Structure formats: C-alpha cells, structure tokens
Image: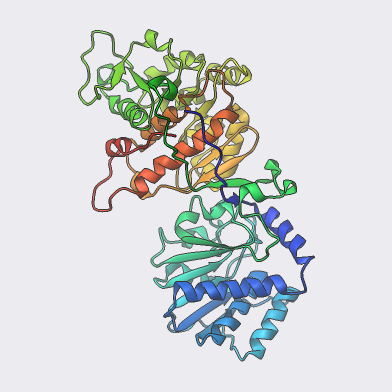
C-alpha cells in the first residue's frame, strides 16, 4: 500500500542547537525570565510526580543548570516542602549572572545551603550539569560533587533531572568517561527528566532510556516551536547540525476494500544456512524473517534456505502461507528482498545476486559480515547505490558489532556515539541504516536521523533482529523497483516502531519469544 504521510514526530536537537535557541529566546525576554520559567516548571513537575514527598533534596551545580535548581527550590519551599540544597563549590569562579541571581533569591527566601546531603529525602532534583557537559571534560570529578553524584545514581528514591541526568551526554546518551565506571547497571528507583526548550537525542538512546526515565518537555516560551519536526523554523533544520526525529507512532489506516495481494507486494527471504553444511543449522533465522514479513502484511512471501535444493524436504515450522523457492527463482522477485538472516558462510556467495535486485533490499546479519570482509562486495554495494532509478533502496540493519566491522571500528567506539556512527555508515555506504539497540538509530545518506522510541528489554533475545528484518521487508515491499532511499524512509520508520510496539503491548505475564513477536506484528496501512 502507498506510504502514509509522515506523522509530526517530536524533534531532537543537539546541544549546540539548543544553546543557540536559548540565546535567541533570551534576547527577546526580560533578564532572568527563562531561568525563572525553568525553575517554576521543574517545581510543578516535582509536585505532580511526587505529590506526597515532604523532604526534597535539590543538588545544584555551579552553572545555569544549578540556577534552575535553586529557582525550583524557592517554589517548592513556598509549596510547603522541606527543601535541602547542596551547591557545588565555584572553585573561585563567579557564578553565571542568572545563577548568581537565583542564589540571591534562594538565600533571601531563607533557604539554607549545605555541603552535606540530608539524612533522608523523598525526592531528589538533579541540577548539577546540563547540556554544557562535554565528553572531553578534563576537570576531575572530586570532592562533594562526586559523593552527591554517586548518591543520586545509587538511590532508590525518585530522582527528577533538570535537562539531562548529570554526567549523561545530551548528544549521545553515553556517560561522561570519568563517571562511567561508577554508574550502576540500572537505576534502583523511578527516574524523570524535564528537558528544557527541546528534546535531546541522548535522552532516548543507549544509557538515556534507563537513566532519563520518563521524559517531559518544557518549551519555556510560546515562541519556541521546536518540539515538533513540522514546526521547526527552516534555519534550525540543517541536517548537518544534527536535527533528528523521535519516532513515537506509526499510522495504521485501513486498506481499501478493493484490494489484492499485489498492492501489498512480495517479500523474498534468503538465508538460513542448513545444518548439513557445517553442523550449525540457522534455518530458524530466515524462517523468523519470513514469518515476520507474512504477519507484517506482505502480499506474498518467498523463502530460500541456503544449502537446500528442490528435492529438500519442507522444514517443519514453515507456515503453509510461505512459498519455498530456489535461488534461481528468487531472481524473478519484484518486491523487497531480505538477505543474510542466519546466512552463515554460504550467504557470501549470494550477496552479489542480492545486490543486483531491482527492488528494495534489506541486508542483515551475515550478509553484513560478508560485505565487511570482502572489498569486492563493498564496491558492489556502492555501485548499487549509484544506480539511481535502476535499483531500489538498500537498508542495512546492523547491531553495534556488525556496524563496527563495516566501519573498521570497535563496538565501544560505536556505542560511544551511536548517532554519529549510524550517520557515518549511511553516508559512507549511501544506504539507509538501522543501528539496533536501546533507542535504535535510523540514519539516511543526507545526514538525517531518527531514534525509535518503542521497544523494551524483552527484545533482548535471539531472533528478534531477524523479525525486524522481515518486518522492514514487508513495509518496503509495495515500493516500485528503482524507488529511492527517500521513498523508503517513512515506511522504514514505521516498521522499526511497530516492531518495538509489538513488544511494548505484549501481555506482561506471557513470555515473549521471537516467533511470538513475528506473529504479533501488524499489517502496514
């Protein structure tokens, strides 16, 4: 079916973009107005998420983020709360003007400031560091600030973070390297983040999903429309500066009654190396991709299991709806092709054929490993991208290790900047890229990117990546041969979101498996 119009996704702005937006707005407002609004918004959210909290610990840094916290403390005391403030020593440097004014207001309101955290608190407000934190920070974290950060990381009490969790890099979702060794595997209590002016990408990928928790947005001005992609001023939409999208939904319009299977397109799946080849049977991976394509709405699904032949018995578990095809017959496929799931060593021999496919192509798993290890396949991949109008869109779906191989990097380097790595791969290979993980990153050759906001830890099992590949294949199947990556962008975002949404809506008391996930997918509109 034709792709639906793009939903108005929330926008993701880099730290530099947010800082420029802040300066622009501040120039139109009276002195201190933005900080006053930020502090008031923080206090209102604190009262909403923890209405019964009596003792509130506000931990403030020596910058404007700390000023927001001081202003929030004033409002919370006025609301009848017992407020305890800890303020980072300024190390001989004067506070920024707005933060200094907030400190004067807090002192005038009778709020005490102590280097010691309270013996007990019901809610903590983390106002130590915001978007000014940089990965290359050289100053050591020591003294009372280090102790406060450790307590914020380890507490089982509610924590409300202003702008970002302190130490989490707003542009990447990675922890500050010097703080990373101290961070527990996961928070013990509820986490909330109030993002000021715009949403930041680091809140929604890598460590951000766990540590930012439930994210709220304070626009702070009626003249700040950057919370939605379709309302960002043109001057802020330069893809090279990092504007992204947060994929929060996918439209599911009902198909017309006068429909037929040809409108939904065909999906071919090549993969699933037989156990007879080297004793490591991986047929299940390709079968999962085919099942996902079937349940996600493909008109027809064809499957070729590597190492099989026309005389091979039909494997148990292959649905009757799925048609087995020889490798030669796959050459006539007109829809989308999914190649690599469970491909093993044999898939390298069929990747050249896959790259000649006229329709959309999804390359996953061992197909990606083959390309990473063979320069001839890398050249063929680039040649496919250069054949505009003759070949369809190409989508790479790596996990971090597979992307590291494609970029000649390491998994740690990929995870250090997932967005940058996905965008680099999309530019380098002139393909659409889906970097899987917590907050999967989708990137395009022109620099645009999106972060998927659906999905949860239930997807951390074998086979769910194969299901994703098949789901993407189904959403691209209706595209005409020769369609560009731009034609495939929106259906790709829908597919990734619906894959995660299936896990989000799975009944809590039932174990989710990859095969169950595949059967729960929804047909695209």
Q: Which is nearer the eye, 318 or 401?
A: 318
Expressed as whole percent of the image width and height from the top left, the position of residue 219 reads 63, 62
Say left or right for 446 vs 201. right
Say left or right for 220 vs 51. right
Could you tell me which residue is drawn at 45 percent across and 19 percent down?
335
The image quarter in which residue 524 lies? top left
Expressed as whole percent of the image width and height from the top left, the position of residue 180 reads 50, 58
Say left or right for 10 vs 151. right
The image quarter in which residue 519 lies? top left
Could you tell me which residue is drawn at 57 percent across and 22 percent down?
483
Q: Which is nearer the eye, 31 or 184?
A: 31
Q: Is 170 rendered above or below residue 522?
A: below
Count the numbered circles shown.
Answer: 0
The quarter in which the C terminus is drawn is top left
Residue farthest toward the right in the current orientation of the protein: 27
Could you tell me which residue is drawn at 52 percent across and 15 percent down?
358
Expressed as whole percent of the image width and height from the top left, the position of residue 226 reads 65, 54
Residue 404 visible to the viewer: no
Residue farthest toward the front in the current orientation of the protein: 258
Q: Is 271 rendered above or below residue 51?
A: above
Q: How is the image coloured?
A: rainbow
Q: Is 495 rendered above or below residue 134?
A: above
Q: Which is nearer the eye, 443 or 5?
A: 5
Residue 224 visible to the viewer: yes
Q: Is 298 rendered above or below residue 244?
A: above
Expressed as whole percent of the image width and height from the top left, the position of residue 205 reads 50, 50
């Amino acid at each position: 079916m034709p792709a639906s119009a793009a939903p108005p996704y929330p926008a993701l702005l880099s730290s530099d973009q947010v800082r420029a937006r802040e300066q622009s707005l501040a120039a139109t407002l009276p002195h201190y107005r933005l900080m006053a609004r930020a502090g008031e918004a923080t206090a209102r959210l604190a009262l909403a998420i923890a209405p019964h909290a009596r003792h509130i610990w506000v931990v403030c840094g020596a910058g404007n983020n700390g000023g927001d916290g001081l202003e929030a403390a004033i409002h919370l005391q006025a609301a009848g709360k017992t407020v305890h403030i800890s303020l980072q020593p300024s190390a001989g440097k004067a506070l920024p003007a707005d933060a200094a004014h907030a400190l004067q207001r807090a002192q005038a309101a009778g709020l005490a400031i102590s280097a010691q955290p309270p013996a007990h608190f019901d809610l903590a407000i983390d106002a130590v560091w915001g978007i000014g934190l940089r990965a290359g920070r050289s100053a050591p974290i020591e003294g009372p600030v280090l102790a406060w950060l450790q307590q914020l990381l380890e507490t089982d009490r509610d924590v409300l973070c202003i702008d970002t969790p302190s130490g989490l890099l707003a542009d990447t979702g990675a922890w500050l390297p010097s703080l990373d060794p101290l961070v527990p595997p996961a928070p013990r209590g509820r986490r909330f983040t109030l993002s000021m002016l715009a949403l930041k990408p680091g809140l929604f990928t890598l460590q951000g999903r766990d540590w930012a928790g439930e994210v709220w947005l304070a626009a702070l001005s009626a003249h700040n429309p950057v919370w939605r992609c379709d309302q960002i001023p043109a001057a802020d939409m330069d893809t090279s500066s990092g504007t992204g999208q947060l994929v929060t939904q996918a439209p599911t319009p009902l198909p017309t009654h006068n429909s037929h299977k040809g409108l939904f397109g065909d999906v071919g799946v090549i993969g699933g190396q037989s156990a007879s080849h080297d004793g490591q049977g991986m047929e299940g991976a390709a079968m999962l991709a085919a099942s996902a394509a079937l349940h996600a709405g493909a008109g027809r699904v064809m499957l070729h299991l590597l190492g099989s032949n026309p005389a091979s018995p039909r494997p148990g578990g292959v649905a009757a709806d799925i048609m087995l095809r020889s490798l030669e017959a796959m050459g006539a496929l007109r829809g989308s092709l999914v190649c690599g799931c469970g491909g093993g060593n044999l898939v390298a021999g069929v990747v050249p054929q896959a790259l000649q496919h006229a329709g959309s192509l999804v390359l996953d798993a061992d197909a990606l490993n083959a390309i990473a290890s063979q320069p001839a396949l890398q050249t063929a991949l680039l040649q496919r991208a250069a054949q505009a109008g003759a070949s369809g869109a190409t989508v790479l779906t790596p996990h971090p290790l597979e992307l590291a191989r494609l970029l000649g990097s390491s998994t740690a380097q990929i995870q250090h900047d997932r967005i940058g790595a996905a965008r680099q791969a999309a530019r380098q290979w002139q393909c659409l890229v889906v970097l899987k993980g917590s907050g999967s990153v989708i990137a395009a050759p022109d620099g645009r990117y999106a972060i998927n906001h659906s999905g949860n830890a239930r997807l951390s099992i074998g086979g769910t990546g194969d299901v994703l590949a098949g789901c993407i294949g189904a959403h691209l199947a209706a595209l005409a041969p020769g369609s560009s990556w731009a034609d495939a962008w929106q259906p790709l975002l829908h597919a990734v979101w619906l894959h995660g949404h299936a896990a989000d809506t799975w009944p809590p008391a039932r174990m989710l498996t990859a095969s169950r996930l595949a059967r729960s997918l929804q047909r695209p509109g």
